[in-house]
């Protein structure tokens, strides 16, 4: 039952084309029906710093980061140590490197199968413009059993805007790599069905938002969310929408509030520092009942923190960061494919409930690219029934949802307001208006029926593990490891964090003897949130480990064992 | 088909009554705005007033159009988002000097630069009224009436017109609350200007700056045609006393966003399929 | 105004009276909002008088095709129509006497405005109507003067107050 996995790390100086090798290799692999994940790791330099393409080729689409690498191809050893804990080499792994270079002691420590080649020379022999990275692509392609034709075609597509000589050099180097007589061999995962998608979590989140009807985006660049906005720009134009590059996050969130007030579904993406700047106006959107969706691609915090690495540490601000009583939606996609679903669901819920939806993605799923089957889509939600004789914008209705007129609607004029207001929208500091409108805004969220999408609950057993968002893959990996050891475990990966579906979660945990809350942050934010929101009939334990190293099933299981032994 | 009923200025007022102090210049601006609407025959349903926070930002509720009373300093951002998403609407943003030049200063600069087709009315009384009369970016350096700055703010005030010009505003006007009919004309022209139009209105605060009644004697209507040359306008805005009224600068340029390209295929997933 | 003096005169008269009325209504409301009931009621009464006068002018104007002037196309002796109370001349603690003095200024300004037409217009009908309107304004002014005489004097410290202004936002 054990599936074959193969993890390949390619390292070198930025600009040497390390990332391109990873992308082309994964694309060629995917064309054959193979599954896999590509992570990218960078030093702090914009250009020329160290960079790494971290590939994990698998037979399933449950993508965790590789815990160790069976293959390493190093263009050079400069600054290799900066990757430290991120690239753990498996004992006896295959290491491709330049013949003349001295291999670092930490690499030699795993007793690698060294393949020392004159890579620069081979590339130069293949073509006068030849580059090492395309030779490397050929070598690794050969190891994976990929054809020269396929690699060459994909490379030519990627280099279409480069000079012809450059493309020819690439082709020649790929051929030299695939044709080189390698004596090493690794077990390769079995390919699945062909016809897959090749997509990053950030692209997937943008796609979900557009498919759910987003036609206005305001953007302020921030790592690691910028590529969501960059990807959206072209398709948005294609769909007749608009993207504005704002002067700051304060403007970005208010621009989407303006567009949404105009009846155009609106969206922005940011990361922790940007979300912090936006929070005042998120309160405005809540109070004025203006539907907006904000994707927060989490990175290491606080402050500037570790912008290029993943963490799940913005849960607190997403849940509790708004001033006043400001009920809103918080959702989290569980994996790259799920970014399409959850992003679309968030947009639809925000529109239906006329509120703010914060979507907590993170750098790990956002900036990783995966091969996935065509992602599941979120079905359109049923439109809320409306009644408006004698129109009142903030009418108190049974559902809490009142009809939102948009400018241009004849005779339904109103002024949206962040000041507390009465049903008509007129500012009011009266106790009764405040109590009623607070209740209205809370009730429309709590009375909504969210269906089965609130979480992905799997497995059976007395042990339960609960997480949110991208921790899901590591959680399932842990459950599998436990199963191998004869321990049945159930997993609950929360997609809807606010409002928390307490009854459903309690039902999912019923009969468990213990619960572990798993998350990638230091403060055990989910653990404390769950403890505050509901009663547990069994002991609850916390496994909270901050980034930048991705969560792994093995580390989770080890922590559980340690706790049990103590 | 029946001729649409021509609305009078008062027909543009809502049922919500202003909380402004009697004697406040903002009444004059409200009146001027509704007079401009009447003169242009503005459609109430297709017009949105957007504001931030402050005395002046209460204005949208007093007009019978669509409105958005946002948070402090961000009215211009809301207004631009709305106008870009809904180019069919007439969008007018307004707010005070603290809202527009202090907390919202960055949005003011970038709105001038971006040149979205909308109007911004800065109702400038040189003071924060809602919070009890603190100095704002346009308050004179020696104004010592606030407990917060008992010796006066001590820093030289902004020159909003100079700032707007430097940031790229193509149309700049100034009015005075003592002359509502002139403000009405300025607002009407501002709305008709194809691009970002900036109207600064000197608006007396009777409660915290009663000395502003002196403005009546200082304000003077500029007789020359609006400047079209940015260098000349810079000279004017840097050296004038700030009390000249009228359309001061008018140099239209291309608005943003440009006309959208023809809609293409609705298939946005093609790039992902291998 | 040379081409159609009467229509122009009537357009100005209608605007003058309706602005006077609108302004009084607005001030009455604003004074009520600020708990100055006495002055609010006075402005309401003035608004009602303006309404009566407006009706009278409007009835005459009905028989003429008036030019459609924009707010800034009217030719007033000052910046606004003469009977519109200046927004900047009022205060929430103003006394009835001060309010009456303002109204008196308005009536006299209107009287002067109409009076100038009565004297200088080339059109006899305009002159006659203007004289009639001026007389009406003068009679309003006389009534106000009489009422003012009956009022007790104001305290010199009327505008002073013990509390600081509020902070609404």
Image: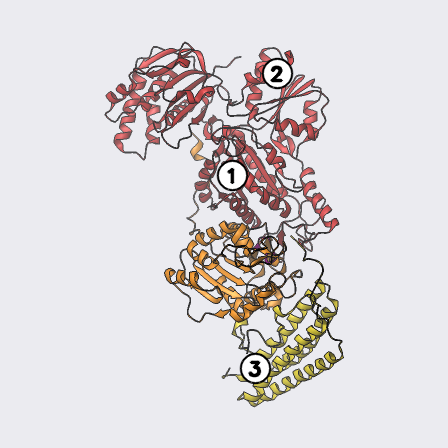
- Mark 1 or mark 2: whose residue is earlier in sequence: 1
Foreground residue, C153 or C28?
A: C153
Q: Residues within 10 Å of mark 3 (few under 14, many from 20)?
A: many
Q: Which residues are magenta?
A: B50-57
Q: Which residue is mark 2?
A: A560
The red one among the chains is A
Residue A553: in magenta span: no
Q: Chain of mark 3?
A: C
Q: Which residue is mark 3?
A: C9
Marks 1 and 2: which is nearer the front? 2
Say which element carries label 1.
strand
Query: Separation of disc 3 and disc 2 at Cα?
Result: 93 Å
Q: Is residue A316 above or below residue A186?
A: below
Are marks 1 and 2 in one subunit?
Answer: yes
Q: Chain of mark 1?
A: A
Q: Is residue C67 above or below residue B142?
A: below
Q: Residue at x 46, y 41 (%)?
A: B266
Hue used for the chain lettered C: yellow
Q: Position of residue A171 (x, y in %)?
A: 29, 25
């Amino acid at each position: 039952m054990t599936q074959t996995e193969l993890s390949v790390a390619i390292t070198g100086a930025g600009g040497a084309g390390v990332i391109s090798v990873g992308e082309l290799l994964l694309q060629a692999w995917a064309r054959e029906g193979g599954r896999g994940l590509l992570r990218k790791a960078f030093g702090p330099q914009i250009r020329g710093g160290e960079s790494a393409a971290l590939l994990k080729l698998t037979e399933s689409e449950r993508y965790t980061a590789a815990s160790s690498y069976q293959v390493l191809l190093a263009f050079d050893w400069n600054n290799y140590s900066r990757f430290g804990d991120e690239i753990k080499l498996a004992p006896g792994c295959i290491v491709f490197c330049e013949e003349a270079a001295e291999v670092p002691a930490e690499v030699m420590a795993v007793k690698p199968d060294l393949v020392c080649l004159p890579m620069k020379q081979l590339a130069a022999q293949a073509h006068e413009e030849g580059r090492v990275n395309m030779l490397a692509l050929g070598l690794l392609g050969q190891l994976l059993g990929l054809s020269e034709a396929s690699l060459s075609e994909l490379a030519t597509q990627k280099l279409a805007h480069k000079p012809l000589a450059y493309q020819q050099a690439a082709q020649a180097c790929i051929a030299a790599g695939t044709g080189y007589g390698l004596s090493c061999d690794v077990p390769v995962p079995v390919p699945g069905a062909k016809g897959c998608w090749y997509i990053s979590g950030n692209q997937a989140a943008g796609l979900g938002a557009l498919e759910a009807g987003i036609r206005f985006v305001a953007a302020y660049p921030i790592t690691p969310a910028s590529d969501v906005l960059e990807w959206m720009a072209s398709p948005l134009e294609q769909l007749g929408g608009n993207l504005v590059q704002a002067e700051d996050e304060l403007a970005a969130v208010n621009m989407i509030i303006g567009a949404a007030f105009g009846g155009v579904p609106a969206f922005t993406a940011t990361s922790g520092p940007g979300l912090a700047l936006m929070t005042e106006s998120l309160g405005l959107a809540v109070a004025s009942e203006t539907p907006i969706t904000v994707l927060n691609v989490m990175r290491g915090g606080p402050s500037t923190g570790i912008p290029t690495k993943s963490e799940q540490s913005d849960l607190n601000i997403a849940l509790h960061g708004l001033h006043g009583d400001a009920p809103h939606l918080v959702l989290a996609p569980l994996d790259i494919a799920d970014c399409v679903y959850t992003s679309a669901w968030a947009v639809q819920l925000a529109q239906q409930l006329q509120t703010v939806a914060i979507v907590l993605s993170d750098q790990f799923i956002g900036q990783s690219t995966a091969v996935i089957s065509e992602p599941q889509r979120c079905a359109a939600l049923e439109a809320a029934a409306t009644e408006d004789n004698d129109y009142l914008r903030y009418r108190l209705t049974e559902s809490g949802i009142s009809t939102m007129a948009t400018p241009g609607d004849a005779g339904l004029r109103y002024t949206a307001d962040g000041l507390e207001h009465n049903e008509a929208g007129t500012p009011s500091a009266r106790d009764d208006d405040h109590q009623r409108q607070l209740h209205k805004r809370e009730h429309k969220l709590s009375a909504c029926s969210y269906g089965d999408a609130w979480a992905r609950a799997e497995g059976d057993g007395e042990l339960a593990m609960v997480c949110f968002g991208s921790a899901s893959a590591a959680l399932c990996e842990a459950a599998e490891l436990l199963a191998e050891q004869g321990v049945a475990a159930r997993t609950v990966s929360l997609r809807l964090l606010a409002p928390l579906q307490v009854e459903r979660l309690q039902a999912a945990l019923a009969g468990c003897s213990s619960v572990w809350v798993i998350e990638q942050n230091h403060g055990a934010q989910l653990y404390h949130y769950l403890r505050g929101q509901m009663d547990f009939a069994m002991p609850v334990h916390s496994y909270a480990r901050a980034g930048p190293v991705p969560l792994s099933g093995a580390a989770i299981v080890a922590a559980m064992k340690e706790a049990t032994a103590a | 088909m029946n001729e649409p009923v021509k609305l009078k200025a008062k027909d543009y007022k809502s049922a919500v009554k202003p909380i402004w102090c009697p004697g406040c210049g903002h009444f004059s601006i409200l009146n001027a705005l509704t007079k401009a609407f009447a003169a242009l025959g503005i459609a109430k349903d297709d017009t949105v007033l957007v504001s931030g926070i402050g005395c002046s930002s209460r204005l949208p509720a007093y007009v019978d159009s669509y409105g958005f009373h946002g948070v402090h300093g961000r009215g211009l951002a809301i207004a631009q988002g709305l106008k870009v998403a809904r180019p069919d609407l007439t969008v007018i943003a307004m707010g005070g000097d603290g809202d527009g030049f202090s907390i919202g200063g960055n949005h003011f600069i970038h709105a001038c630069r971006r040149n979205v087709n909308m109007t911004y009315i800065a109702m400038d009384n040189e003071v924060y009224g809602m919070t009890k009369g603190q100095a704002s970016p346009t308050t004179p350096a020696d104004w010592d009436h606030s407990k917060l700055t008992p010796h006066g703010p001590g820093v030289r005030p902004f020159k909003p017109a100079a700032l707007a010009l430097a940031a790229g505003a193509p149309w700049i006007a100034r009015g005075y609350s003592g002359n509502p009919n002139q403000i009405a004309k300025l607002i009407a022209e501002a709305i008709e200007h194809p691009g970002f139009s900036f109207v600064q209105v000197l608006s007396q605060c009777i409660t915290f700056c009663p000395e502003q009644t002196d403005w009546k004697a200082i304000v003077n209507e500029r007789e020359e045609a609006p400047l079209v040359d940015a260098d000349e306008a810079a000279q004017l805005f840097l050296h004038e006393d700030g009390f000249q009224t009228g359309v001061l600068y008018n140099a239209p340029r291309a608005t943003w966003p440009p006309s959208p390209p023809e809609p293409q295929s609705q298939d946005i997933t093609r790039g992902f399929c291998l | 105004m040379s081409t159609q003096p009467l229509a122009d005169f009537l357009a100005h008269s209608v605007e003058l009276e309706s602005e006077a009325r609108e302004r009084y209504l607005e001030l009455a409301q604003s004074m009520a909002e600020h708990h100055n009931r006495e002055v609010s009621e006075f402005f309401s009464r003035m608004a009602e008088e303006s309404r009566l006068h407006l009706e009278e002018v409007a009835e005459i104007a009905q028989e003429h095709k008036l030019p459609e002037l924009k707010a800034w196309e009217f030719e007033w002796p000052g910046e606004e129509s003469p009977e519109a109370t200046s927004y900047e001349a009022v205060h929430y603690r103003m006394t009835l006497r001060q309010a009456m003095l303002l109204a008196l200024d308005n009536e006299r300004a209107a009287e002067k405005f109409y009076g100038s037409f009565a004297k200088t217009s080339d059109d006899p009908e305009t002159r006659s109507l203007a004289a009639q309107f001026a007389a009406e304004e003068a009679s309003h002014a006389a009534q106000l003067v009489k009422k003012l005489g009956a009022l007790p004097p104001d305290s010199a410290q009327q505008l002073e107050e013990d509390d600081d202004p509020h902070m609404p936002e």
